[in-house]
Image (cartoon, rainbow, N blue to C red):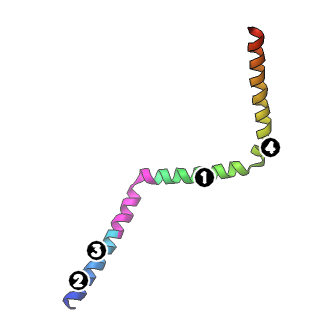
Amino acid sequence: MNAPEIQQEIQQTRERLGQTVEELAARADVKARARAKAAQVSRRVSRQVSRSPFVQRRWPLAAAAGVLVAGSVMVWRWRKT
C-alpha cells in the first residue's frame, strides 16, 4: 500500500466511525426518542378518532346538549334577577 491509499482508508474509517457515533448518540437520546414516539402515537390516535363513526355521530348530540345547558343557565340567571 502506498501513502494515498492509506490516507484514503483512514478517511473512510473516520467516516464510518463518525456515522457509528451518530447512531449511538441517537440511540442514547431517550428524551428525543420518547418525544418522537409520543408524536407518532398522537398522530395515529387523532387520525383514528377523526375517522370513528361513533365520534362523528355523537358530535351533533354533544353540541346540542352544550347549547341546551348554556341556554338553561342563561334563562335561570335571567329569571333570578
Q: Which one is earlier in the sequence, the residue at label 4 or at label 1?
A: 1
Element class at badge 3: helix
Magenta residues, start to end: 19-32
Asked if the residue at tag 1 contacts the one at tag 4, i.e. Cβ–Cβ closer than 8 Å, the answer is no
Tag 4–tag 2 contact (CB < 8 Å)? no
Residue ID for mark 3: 14
Evaluate if marks 3 and 1 touch, with contact meaning CB atoms under 8 Å apart. Answer: no
Location of the N terminus (image quadrant): bottom left
Tell me which amino acid carries mark 4.
Arg
Membership of 24 in magenta stretch:
yes
- Tell me the residue at 78%/48% (across/down): 53
Q: Position of 38 compared to 23: left or right?
A: right
Label 4: element kind:
helix
Q: Residues within 10 Å of mark 4 (few under 14, many from 20)?
A: few
Estimate how packed mark 3 is, as few (under 14), some (14 to 19) or many (20 or more) residues with alpha carbons within 10 Å. Answer: few
Q: Are marks 3 and 4 in contact (CB under 8 Å)?
A: no
Left or right of 20: which side holds 72? Answer: right
Residue 57: mark in rendering: 4
Q: Position of residue 75 (x, y in %)?
A: 78, 17
The answer to which of marks 3 and 1 sits earlier in the sequence is 3
Q: Position of residue 55 (x, y in %)?
A: 75, 44
User: Percent x, y for residue 69?
Assistant: 76, 24
As drawn, is 26 to the left or to the right of 68?
Answer: left
Q: Helix or strand or loop: what does disc 1 sit on?
A: helix
Do the numbered discs 3 and 2 sit on residues whose CB atoms are within 8 Å? no
In the rendered view, would you say 75 is above or below 36?
above
Location of mark 2 (residue): 7
**Spatial separation of the CA atoms under disc 3 and disc 2:** 10 Å
Quadrant, the C terminus: top right
